[in-house]
Image (cartoon, helix red, strand yellow):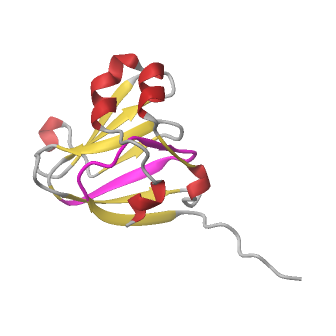
Amino acid sequence: MAIEPPPPRSTSCSRAISSPPFHRLRSDEVWHFYAGSGLIVHVITPAGEYQQLLLGSSNPASGEHFQGVVPAGCWFGSSLRQPETFALVGCTVAPGFDFADFEMAKREELIAQCPQHRNIIERLTRDELDPKSLSS
């Protein structure tokens, strides 16, 4: 009898990013800020409410934090607070990340669900993007 290893209890990654498109997960995702420019994580809740997580270290008075949580089921993407810079961040997902728990936003469908957020949805969605291309 083959014994399969259990799924990971959590997974994490670190990367320099600029603006990943809107996507959602079945699990909470904790974002950790390490270096670079401040980052805005744009969040649209299942109820259609828009929220921002401000990550960074240079301006705590403006609401920047070293970490923030995107709750499961929320659409989210990010943008740099200062264009033409970078942010080095890490993300932790528990239970562990699995592409089966990942959904990339489809622009027109998300706009139909949340027309009040059309501008940010258009900025942070891409046409026919392969989600596995985000892992490189």
Residue at image point 27% right, 48% down: 19
Residue at image point 53% right, 41% down: 72
Q: Is residue 103 left or right of residue 2?
A: left
Location of residue 14 in the rendering, given as x and y in whole percent from the top left corner: 34, 66
- Residue closest to the far right: 1
Q: Is residue 7 left or right of residue 84?
A: right
Q: Is 99 drawn above or below residue 47 in the view shown?
A: below
Q: Quadrant of the N terminus?
A: bottom right
Location of residue 45 in the rendering, given as x and y in whole percent from the top left corner: 46, 29
117 or 51, which is in the foreground? 117
69 or 113, which is in the foreground? 113
Which of the 4 image quarters holds residue 123? Answer: top left
Which of the 4 image quarters holds residue 60? Answer: top left
Location of residue 73 in the rendering, given as x and y in whole percent from the top left corner: 53, 37
Residue at image point 48% right, 21% down: 113
Location of residue 22 in the rendering, given as x and y in whole percent from the top left corner: 39, 41
Q: Which residues are magenta?
A: 17-35
Q: Is residue 34 magenta?
A: yes
Q: Is residue 98 left or right of residue 126?
A: right
Q: Is residue 108 magenta?
A: no
Q: Quadrant of the C terminus?
A: bottom left
Q: Is 55 drawn above or below residue 123 in the view shown?
A: below
**Is there any visible trace of residue 78 in the rendered image?**
yes
**Is there any visible trace of residue 48 in the rendered image?**
no
Q: Is 78 drawn above or below residue 13 in the view shown?
A: above
- Residue closest to the far top: 116
